[in-house]
Image (tube, rainbow, N blue to C red):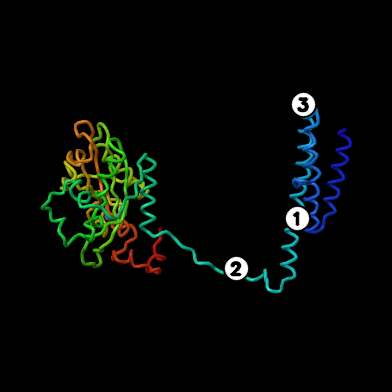
Amino acid sequence: MWHTEICMIDEILKELEQVQTENDLTAFHKNYLSKTGKLTMMMAGLKDLSPEQRAEAGKRYNELKRAVEIEFFKKQAFLKEQAVNEKLKNDPLIDITRPAINELQGTLHPITHLTRKVSEICRSMGFLIVDGNEVVTEFENFDAVNVPADHPARDMQDTFWLTNGKLLKTQTSALQHEILKKYGPVVSAIFPGRCYRNEATDASHEFSFFQCEGMMVGKDISIANLIYIMKTILSGIYGKEIEVRLRPGYFPFVEPGFELDASCPFCGGKGCSVCKQSGWIEFCGCGMIHGNVLKMAGVNPEEYQGFAFGFGLTRMAMMQYAVNDVRLFNSGNLEFLRGIKR
Ligand SMILES: [Zn+2]
């Protein structure tokens, strides 16, 4: 019985070999491989066999059908390529010797580039990367991060208030509350984003800029953890060992609060124009999260502690790429963007 089928397959393959056009190939498919094709019908005939015969014959038929299909696809690809080559040879409108059009290549915006770099480093340490809203409530932006009711930062002059009573976030800290409530009490997250201040613009002030906030909350989190994480982030960004030092600083949402300085990555601490010859650059504000901030988000400060830090991505980009006018980042000036070596 097998012998007959093998002969049959040989004939089918020979027939396929003779196929020269796409039309013939379609006819071949209809004749053998389609739903009503001979090979498919042969499979359907298996139901008349005994169970043992059916198993063995089924396997064999499948192999034969597969062998024909493989040759069919090869032939199909061959005919397609032949058609393309014919077209290229004979179509007078296609000139394959013409040089390709030199397409302009886009690049990432320098702030996007830095944001991704920081995110990558933090993700490798298990931090969540959270993308928050730009429109927040007064509670989230001020009250929830312990900004006193009479604090000058709340001044109407400094904030873009919306007609619905909400505002454009003035600091990435505005997301602390939401993140603590959503992921807390044990959470490590950074939240880079755009902030807004209602102020006159000049070379060092812009009404819209980028910050990156981060926090780590859990049991027994201490200032030592803060120092280690900041050193790791900074060393990762600059690709070299960076030292950090803390000075006392005041931010309403941390207690104790610090200003963190980093050893100047541009001169290695010897002194240069970026660090104003001091060997250190002021990098960010940070500290242990204030008990009130934790409490307001439903986290018990007796049980959990954490640190928070926030630095300017825009400011970092200015230092990194020696840009002396902050307004250039939002300008859409392609010449400026192309000139930056990322
Ligand atoms: Zn320096």
Q: CA distance from mark 1 to mark 3?
A: 40 Å
Which residue: 31% across, 48% down?
191
Q: Earlier in the sequence, mark 1 or mark 3?
A: 3
Q: CA distance from mark 1 to mark 2?
A: 27 Å
Q: Residue furthest bottom?
A: 92
Q: Position of residue 173 (x, y in %)?
A: 24, 49
| Front disc: 1 or 2 | 1
Q: Position of residue 192 (x, y in %)?
A: 32, 51
- Three-letter amino acid code at the position of disc 2: Ala
Q: Position of residue 27 (x, y in %)?
A: 80, 54
Which residue: 27% across, 37% down?
217
Where on the image, by quarter, is ligand 1? bottom left
> Against 304, is 196 above or below?
below
Along the line of sight, the residue nearer the viewer: 38 or 314: 38
The residue identified by callout 1 is 78
Tell me the element at label 2: loop
The residue identified by callout 2 is 100
Q: Is mark 3 within 8 Å of ligand 1?
A: no
Along the line of sight, the residue nearer the viewer: 69 or 265: 69
Q: Quadrant of the C terminus?
A: bottom left
Disc sitting over residue 51 in the figure: 3
Q: Quadrant of the N terminus?
A: top right
* Label 2 crowd bin: few (<14), some (14–19), many (20+), radius 10 Å: few
Q: Earlier in the sequence, mark 3 or mark 2?
A: 3
- Three-letter amino acid code at the position of disc 1: Phe
